[in-house]
Image (spheres, rainbow, N blue to C red):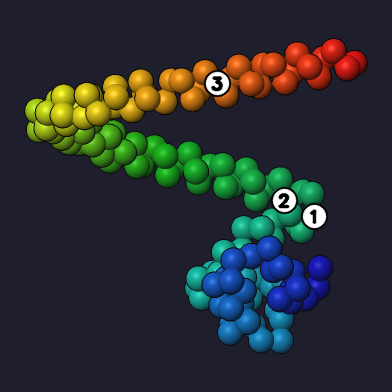
Amino acid sequence: MDLITLDHLKRACPEQRELFQRVFPEGAEVTDANALCAVAAGLKIQWLARFLPARRRKAYYEARELAQKAYDEATAPDRKAYYEALELARKAYDEATAPDRKAYDEATSLAQKAYYDALAPAQKAYYDTVAYTLVLFLKTL
């Protein structure tokens, strides 16, 4: 691939397509300078890796894997703190809303029971009809 054009970005989101068109109105040659320009402009170019020769593609994925590992290790303490804070917030929320949830459940339980009781005969009639229809159909086989 010597020149990347908007046609190569058919499956890209509209924002990325528009940005590519603004940055490279005539398309872009695959060069280091253009790659740096694309990244600086905010284009997501990771998909280009699939067009690299096999040896360079392998090296790219290995480097990306190392970068991902370093990122995961660097952010692990913050991620752990975030999930711990989230857990505390969820617990506080559940405790704070428990009385209201209980009151709601009590207030709606009679109406819910009445609804399901009223629905039961119609559901039974429906399922009986479906079963009867199936039996009639099976007799025709």
Residue 122 point in image, percent of width and height: 49, 25
- Please state, as top left, top right, bottom left or bottom right, where the C terminus lies in the image: top right
Residue 18 point in image, percent of width and height: 58, 78
Instruction: Please name whichever residue, 55 or 84, is drawn nearer the observer in this view of the structure.
Output: 84
Is residue 106 rendered to the left or right of residue 122?
left
| Location of residue 16 by image quarter | bottom right
Label 2 amino acid? Arg
Residue carrying label 1: 53
SS for tag 3?
helix
Vertically, is 28 above or below 124?
A: below
Residue carrying label 3: 125
Identity of the residue drawn at 22% across and 24% down: 110
Residues under numbered marks 3 and 2 in contact, where contact means CB atoms less than 8 Å apart: no
- Which mark, by number, is residue 76? none
Sequence order check: which comes first, mark 3 or mark 1? 1
Residues under numbered marks 2 and 1 in contact, where contact means CB atoms less than 8 Å apart: yes
> How many C-alpha atoms fall within 10 Å of the one at disc 3: few (<14), some, or many (≥20)?
few
Vertically, is 107 above or below 133?
A: below
Residue carrying label 2: 57
Which of the two discs, 3 and 1, sits closer to the camera?
3
Label 1 amino acid? Pro
Instruction: Please name whichever residue, 127 or 109, is drawn nearer the observer in this view of the structure.
Output: 127
Can I make out residue 91 in this image?
A: no
